[in-house]
Amino acid sequence: MTTQELKKAFEAAYGKPAEAVYFAPGRVNLIGEHTDYNGGPVFPCALSFGTRLLIAKNDKKVMNFKSLNLPEVKSLKFDQLTTRLEKSWVNYPLGVMAQFIKRGKTFTDGYDILIWGDVPNGAGLSSSAALEVVTAFALNDQMKAGFSRADLALIGQKAEHEFALVNCGIMDQFVSAHGAKDHAVYLDTTTLEYELVPVKLEGVKIVISNTHSPHKLDSGAYNQRVAECKKAVEQLNKVRPIKFLAELTEADFKKIESAITDPVAHKRARHVVGEVQRTSDAVKALKAGNLKLFGKLMNASHVSLRDDYEVTGPELDCMAEEAWKIDGVIGSRMTGGGFGGCTVSLVKDEAIDTFIKKVGANYEKRIGIKPDFYIAEIGDGATRLA
Ligand code: GLA
C-alpha cells in the first residue's frame, strides 16, 4: 500500500488523520547464521519490504493498536504496558513500550497506532524485528526520547526476549535500524561496530526463495540452540576462559574441542567457529569482487547449518539442493533462524527465469508446496516517511 492509501486507512480506523508515518525494513542475511548470540559477525541487508506504522496522539491516555494485516485490536492503559499478553501480535509494539518505561521514559500521551507490513509472515525475513524497530523508531521520534539507532535495536531485541520469549541475537533489529540502500551491514555483534559494504553485483541478483514450510522457527528450538552454545562455552572454560564461541579460530577450536564432552554441543560449536571464519572470508571476497568464492562460502554455510547446527529441514535442504543444480547459481543457502522460511541465492541475470521455473517445479514436485520467489531489493533502515 502507498503512504496515501495508508493515511486513508488510518482515518477510516480512527476517524482522524495520522500525524506521522514510519517505516522499518525486514532483512535477508547473506552469511553469518547463528553467530550473533555467539559474539560473531553477521552480514545482512535490509530489504525494501518492511513494516509501516502510522500514529497520532489521543487525549484518552490509552494506547490503541490496530493492524491491516491481522484482525486483533487492543486498547491498553498506561499501567498495562509492562505486562506481556498471551499470543498476540501486539506483544511486539507493547514489548518496545515496556522497554521505554524500563529505560526511564514516561508516557504522558496516549497514541493511536495503525500497522501495515509487506514482509511475508513466518518467512524468516524478520517481520517481527521490523515491527519492533518501527515502533521504537516512531516512539523515539514522537517522544523526543533521544535514543540512538543502536539503542533502538537493543530495545527491539529486549522486547523480543521478554515479550516474544525468543532469546535472539541483535542481527535482525540492528540491520532494520541501520540498513542502507545497496549495502550489506557487516556487524561485529560484540562491539556493535559495523561497516556498510556496497553490494553492487554486476549481472547478478539476490533471489529469495520462500519454502512456505509449515515448520516455523519456534522459540523452543531457537532457545535450545542458544542453550547448547552456552553449554559448549561452559565446557570449553575448563581449558580456556572464553565468553563467546566466536573468540576461537578454527585452529584454536581444534586444539581444545575435546573439552566439549556433549556431542550435540560439540557440533553446534563447530558450526559457529566455522561460520565466523566463513563470514569474514565472504566479506573479503565480496570486497575483492570474488563472487565465486562468496558463493562457495554460502553453500558451505548451508551444509554446516544442515549437518552441525541442524536447523534446515527437508524444505530448506530441497530448495538449496535444487538451486545448486542450476547453471548460473553462484551460491545458495538458508537464511535466518531456519527450520522453515527462505533461502537466499546469488543468481546470474540470464539464469533467473530458469531458476524460478526449475527450482519452483522441482521443489513443488518433491515437497508438495508451491514456493514463492522474490528478487531482493536492498533498501534503507528505519525512517520517517511522512
Ligand atoms: C533469528 C534471530 C537472529 C539470528 C538468526 C540466525 O533471525 O532473530 O538474532 O540469531 O535467527 O542467524
Image (tube, grey):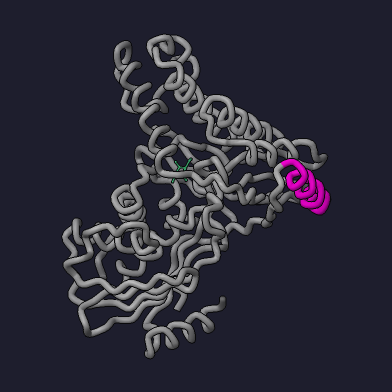
For this view, does 21 lie left or right of residue 122?
left
Query: Residue at (57%, 27%) from the top-left corner?
Result: 304
For this view, does 168 lie left or right of residue 365?
left
Q: Magenta stretch: give its range.
A: 350-366
The N terminus: image quadrant? bottom right
Which residue is at the front of the view, 49 or 80? 80
Residue 271, percent across and down? 51, 26
Residue 49, percent across and down? 56, 63
Count of marks overlaid on the render: 0
Query: Residue at (51%, 46%) from the top-left corner?
Result: 216
State yes or no: residue 74 in magenta: no
For this view, does 151 lie left or right of residue 252?
left
Q: Up-down: is 15 above or below 170? A: below
Residue 233, percent across and down? 35, 22
Q: Quadrant of residue 93?
A: bottom left
State yes or no: residue 351 in magenta: yes
Residue 116 visible in the current orientation: yes
Residue 61, percent across and down? 20, 78
Magenta segment's dominant SS is helix
